Amino acid sequence: MATSSTANAQRGWELAARAGYAVSGVLHILIGVLALRVAFGSPAQQADQSGALGTIAATPFGATVLWFSVVAFVALGTWQAAKAIAGVSPSGAGSGGGAGERAKAAGRAIVYAGLALTALSFARGGGSSSSAQTADMTAKLMRAPGGRLLVAALGIAILAVGVYHVYKGWKKKFLEDLHRLPSGSAGPVVRRLGVIGYVAKGVALAIVGVLFITAAAQADPSKATGLDGALHTLRDQPAGVVMLVIVALGFVAFGAYSFVRARYGRI
C-alpha cells in the first residue's frame, strides 16, 4: 500500500512538473506576441515574463491560471532541485548525474523558482516590472565589494547561456530531450519549432548578457533591463524591427515546442 501511494504521489509530482513546461510555453508565446507589439510601435506591457503574467492576470480566469502556474513551477523547480542533488530525476529516468548535468538542473531549479515567485506575486494581485527589478538587483550587486565584477560575471554567464541555446537549436541537440519519443520520430514541424525557438531565445538571452556587461563597464545599473530591455535594444538597431519580428516569432515557436516537451520531454 505504501509503495503504491508513493508511486502515485511521484506520478502526480511528475505530471505537475510537466505542466510547468506547458505553462512556460504559454508565457513564451505571450512574450512573442508582446514583442511583436513592441516591434510595430504599439503600446504594450513589458515583453517579458512580467508582461506575459500581467496579460494572463487581466483575463476572466487569470487568477486561477496564475495559481495553477505557481503550483506547476514549484513542482518543476523542486523536481530539478532533486535532480541536481541526486544526479537523476526523481522517477529514476535519465543518465547518471555528471557535474555538468547537475549544474544545469540546479540552474533550471533557480529559474523555475524565480518564475514561481513572480507568478505568485501576480496571483496575489501584485506584480511589478521585471526591468525595474533587474535594475534594482544590479544596483545592489554593484554596491557590494567587487560588485561591478559580479555584475560582469553574471552578464558573461547569461551570454554563455544564450550562446548555448543557439548551439542547442542549430545542432538540434534539443531532440535529445524528447526521450519519450522513439529515436528519429520527431517530425519536421517539431524540428523547425525547436531550431527557430532555441536560436531566437538564445539571441535574446545573449543581448541580456551584453546589457549586464555594459552596465558593469559603465557602472550604470539602469543599463541592465532584462529581456524587455534586450528586445527594445534589438528594435533600435539598424533593421531592428525585422530582427525583432524574427525573434518574436521565435519565442512563439519556442512556446509551441515547450508543449511537445511537456508531453514527451525529459524533466
Image (cartoon, rainbow, N blue to C red):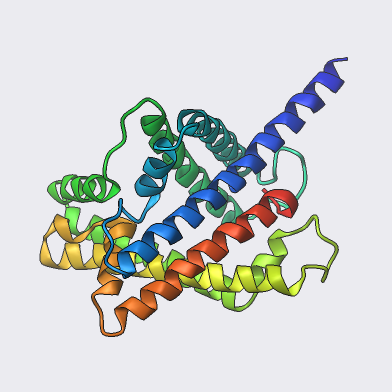
Relative height, residue 53 to residue 126 (above, below)? below
Decide which of 133, 104 is in the foreground and name it.
Answer: 133
The answer to whether residue 154 of the structure is visible from this angle is no
The answer to whether residue 112 of the structure is visible from this angle is yes
Extreme residue toward the bottom, this view: 238
Which residue is located at x 30 percent, y 51 percent? 45
Snapshot quadrant of residue 205: bottom left
Decide which of 211, 231 is in the foreground and name it.
Answer: 231
**Direction from residue 73 to residue 242 in the image, left or right:** left
Which residue is located at x 54 percent, y 75 percent? 167
Relative height, residue 251 to residue 136 (above, below)? below
Q: Where is residue 166 shown, x and y percent of the image?
A: 51, 73
Q: Where is residue 224 shown, x and y percent of the image?
A: 22, 58
Snapshot quadrant of residue 218: bottom left
**Number of numbered discs on residues:** 0
Relative height, residue 222 to residue 78 (above, below)? below
Q: Where is residue 141 shown, x and y percent of the image?
A: 20, 48
Decide which of 187, 42 is in the foreground and name it.
Answer: 42
**Direction from residue 64 to residue 41 in the image, left or right:** left
Which residue is located at x 38 percent, y 69 percent? 206
Q: Quadrant of the N terminus?
A: top right
Q: Where is residue 199 shown, x and y percent of the image?
A: 51, 73
Extreme residue toward the top, this view: 1
Which residue is located at x 44 percent, y 61 percent? 32
Snapshot quadrant of residue 204: bottom left
**Direction from residue 94 to residue 126 in the image, left or right:** left
